[in-house]
Amino acid sequence: MRSIDPLFPSEPNRARYLPAISHEYAVAATRNKLQIAGLSGKSLDYLSKGNARGDEDTVSRHFYYPCTLTSAGQAARTVAKSQHTTMVSQRDRAGTFVIADSGGYQIQQGKLPWEGDATVRRMLRWMEDTADWVMALDFPTGGITKGTIIPHIRRLQGEGHGNALDSLIQSNQLGMPFNACLLQTRINTDLMLAERDPAKAGFLVVLQGRNESESSAWYQEFRSRITDGVAFAGGHARSYALFLSRILDMRADGTLKELKHIHVLGTSTIECAVLFTHIQRLIRQFDNPDLQITYDTASPFLLAFKAYKLYTSYGLDYVSSGFADDAPSEVDPSVYGVPINEWCWRLTEQRNIECDAMGRDMQSPVQTYVGTKLTVGDLL
């Protein structure tokens, strides 16, 4: 199980953000024939070292970032999709780092066709062939309020798991929907642990829960199954108290010193980056010198794909931090011919950003290589 630190030699011992790449983006980044304003689809491949060299004869210097998270719930939703060539499947495995999410989110949204063990095995095989770390296929507790767990409750009972559900309910007193999520995740995790190939990838046991009671009960059920690492999902990304409670549990029972990896799903604020880095450094100093923490969101891809916006500027001061996003479709036609970078400068000036007390410009426009090539009109 490789460490991320060698990929960032000038910035060791930090928690690392993993952009949660969309499957459509990953496919487009393999297509040299896709051309916009002289930029090929291959220029989108941020896992390629060519982007770091700026070698325009091979790969455009769009940007280079050697880590990402990919979702089996998107890429392996069907057998046909699982065979697509993507920038992740074509990556240099020695020089990149990839975690594969198993598709729990797609189950929560009701978008992943459920075929029982066949689905679990397809996800496992695809993740092991694609990533350095794989996740157990969980049934998220977020599906409780959405109602997407209800059909699975009936299915589990029909498959003969009624007694197991009743036993869990009696033990933790947390109700049928929660325990259906827990039980199906336990079934999936046990199958994956039995059939995984440890030589291919590390394994992350998923920890769910919307509050302390659910999180604690889930951890007690899965602690004996933790081998290499854990992935925190559900309320853990929104509540640092919930996250830290489980870290302390793992420290108390000895699990923490054996872990190689912790991943936190669905968060990417600057605040969490600072917190996770601080926690990682403390754990490395006092408990486990090999532990790595990562975290992810799909925000950049969702912003472009669903909102059709892009980040144009960012701010950071002693009080707050944040990004500004704007939609090219909302600009005056007179701006269509303006390069993206110039447009970002104009927007920043219009917002009348002030300097802090030390005279530093605390908000700057987003300036990229691709922004020198594309105009606002190219994005319409």
Image: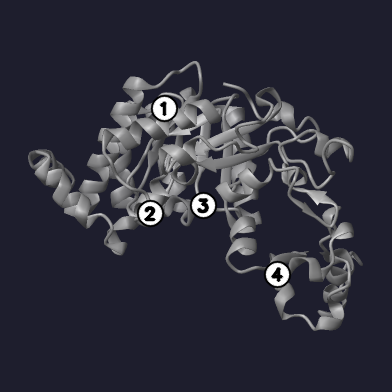
Question: Disc 3 residue type?
Answer: Gly
Nearer the observer: mark 3 or 1; the answer is 3
Pointer 3 with pointer 2, Cβ within 8 A: no
The residue at which mark 1 appears reads as 255
Looking at the picture, how far across and down is residue 67, in whole percent?
Answer: 66, 37
Residue at 30%, 42% (x, y): give it: 218
Which label number is shown at residue 325? 4
Residue at 77%, 41% (x, y): give it: 64
**Distance (Cα) linking label 4 and label 2:** 28 Å
Nearer the observer: mark 3 or 4; the answer is 4
Please rate how many residues cluster around mark 4, counting C-alpha atoms within 10 Å: few if below 14, some from 14 to 19, many from 20.
Answer: some
Looking at the picture, how far across and down is residue 172, in whole percent?
Answer: 18, 46
Question: Disc 1 residue type?
Answer: Thr
Q: Secondary structure at mark 3?
A: loop
Question: Disc 2 residue type?
Answer: Lys
- Up the image or down, 192 lies above or below 149; here it is above
Quadrant that contains the N terminus: top right
The residue at which mark 2 appears reads as 111
Which label number is shown at residue 266? 3
- In the image, 254 versus 80, the foreground residue is 80
Q: Is residue 161 left or right of residue 250?
A: left
